[in-house]
Amino acid sequence: MAYVNTTNAPSFADRYHAVMSAIATRRKQNRVYRATFNELSALSNRELADLGMARSQIRSIALETGRDAA
């Protein structure tokens, strides 16, 4: 009786591609975060209130927007 053990371990190229893809995703998320943060920070308190947000929420809103950019 023959026994064959096959493992489907990812190749170096597969792992490299996964790492590069993860880096590209993080860079895109960071760009969206910075753009959102900068645009919201440029608004006055009155403009932010018109949008229904406070200045203290800018960071969390920008983080959420960046995460959703993937």
Image (cartoon, rainbow, N blue to C red):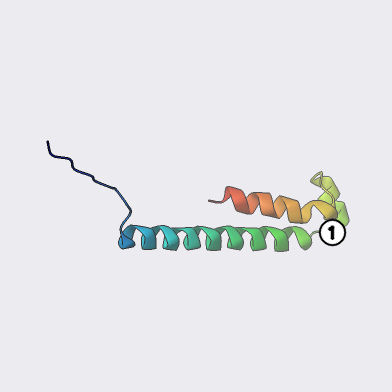
Q: Determine the residue positioned at 67% across, 49% down.
A: 64
- Relative placement, left or right, of 15 versus 29 is left
Q: Is residue 47 visible?
A: no
Residue closest to the eye, 59 or 8: 8
Q: Determine the residue positioned at 62% across, 54% down.
A: 66
Residue closest to the eye, 7 or 51: 7
Residue 49, image x and y in percent? 85, 48
Q: Determine the residue positioned at 79% across, 46% down.
A: 51
Mark 1: give few (<14), some (14-19) or many (20+) Cα within 10 Å. few
Residue 10, image x and y in percent? 33, 54
The quarter holding residue 56 reads bottom right
Residue 22, image x and y in percent? 48, 58
Q: Is residue 55 visible?
A: yes
The total number of labels drawn is 1
Q: Residue furthest top?
A: 1
- Relative placement, left or right, of 25 versus 40 is left
- Above or below — where is 1 with respect to 11? above
Quarter of the picture containing the N terminus is top left
The quarter holding residue 39 reads bottom right
Q: Residue furthest front?
A: 1
- Relative placement, left or right, of 38 versus 7 is right
Q: Give the structural element (helix, strand or loop) at label 1.
A: loop
Residue 30, image x and y in percent? 60, 62
- Relative placement, left or right, of 33 versus 27 is right
- Above or below — where is 31 with respect to 57? below
Q: Residue furthest right?
A: 46
Q: Which residue, given by chain and number where applicable, does mark 1 sit on? A: 44
Q: Determine the residue positioned at 80% across, 51% down.
A: 57
Amino acid on which disc 1 is placed: Ser
